[in-house]
């Protein structure tokens, strides 16, 4: 699963470049202000948080992708207990979506 590793590497770089937002409320603010370019959601997120984020993304027409579990996501961004991340940079978002949609249909 080389593609999966690639998207995690890009996610790590985006995090270090401060182009990511964490935390449910902050992500929702980024979605509402349309700063979020794509929202990555861990596959093992809680039902209510999942519904809230996917509903907001759908309403504001922001793409979202379900990815690996929270541990994989947390490790990629270097923060503990992360279940979702908003990518706020078009370049990073485009590359991550490319890698995930072409190679990781989940």
Image (spheres, grey):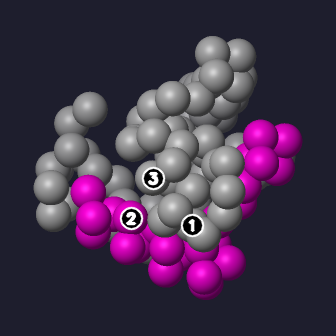
Q: Residues within 10 Å of mark 2 (few under 14, many from 20)?
A: some
Q: Is residue 103 visible to the viewer in this orientation of the structure?
A: yes
Q: Nearer the viewer, mark 2 or mark 3?
A: 3
Disc assigned to residue 41: none
Q: Is residue 89 shown left or right of residue 56?
A: left
Look at the magenta stretch and give its main secondary structure.
Answer: helix
User: Which residue occupies the extreme bottom position in the image?
Assistant: 17
Instruction: Give, as a single range, the part of the protein colored magenta.
Output: 4-27
Q: Residue at x 67, y 48 (%)?
A: 81
Mark 1 or mark 2, which has the lower sequence index? 2
- Residue 78, position as x, y percentages in the image: 60, 69
Q: Earlier in the sequence, mark 2 or mark 3?
A: 2
Measure the alpha-carbon separation of dots 2 and 3. 8 Å
The answer to whether residue 73 is above or below residue 94 is: above
Q: Nearer the viewer, residue 9 or 98?
A: 9
Residue 77: give its label. 1
Q: Nearer the viewer, residue 42 or 37?
A: 42
In three-dimensional space, the C-alpha distance between marks 3 and 1, rounded to whole angstroms, equals: 9 Å
Spatial CA span between label 1 and label 2: 8 Å
Q: Nearer the viewer, residue 103 or 78?
A: 78
**Residue 22 percent across, percent down from the top left:** 72, 55
Residue 8's disc number: 2
């Amino acid at each position: 699963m080389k593609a999966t590793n690639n998207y995690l590497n890009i996610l790590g770089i985006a995090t270090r470049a401060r182009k990511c937002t964490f935390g449910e409320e902050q992500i929702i603010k980024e979605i509402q202000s349309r700063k979020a370019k794509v929202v990555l959601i861990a596959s093992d997120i809680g039902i209510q948080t999942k519904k809230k984020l996917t509903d907001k993304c759908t309403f504001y027409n922001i793409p979202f992708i379900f990815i690996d579990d929270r541990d994989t996501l947390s490790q990629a961004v270097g923060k503990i207990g992360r279940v979702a991340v908003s990518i706020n940079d078009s370049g990073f978002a485009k590359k991550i979506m490319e890698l995930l949609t072409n190679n990781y249909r989940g």
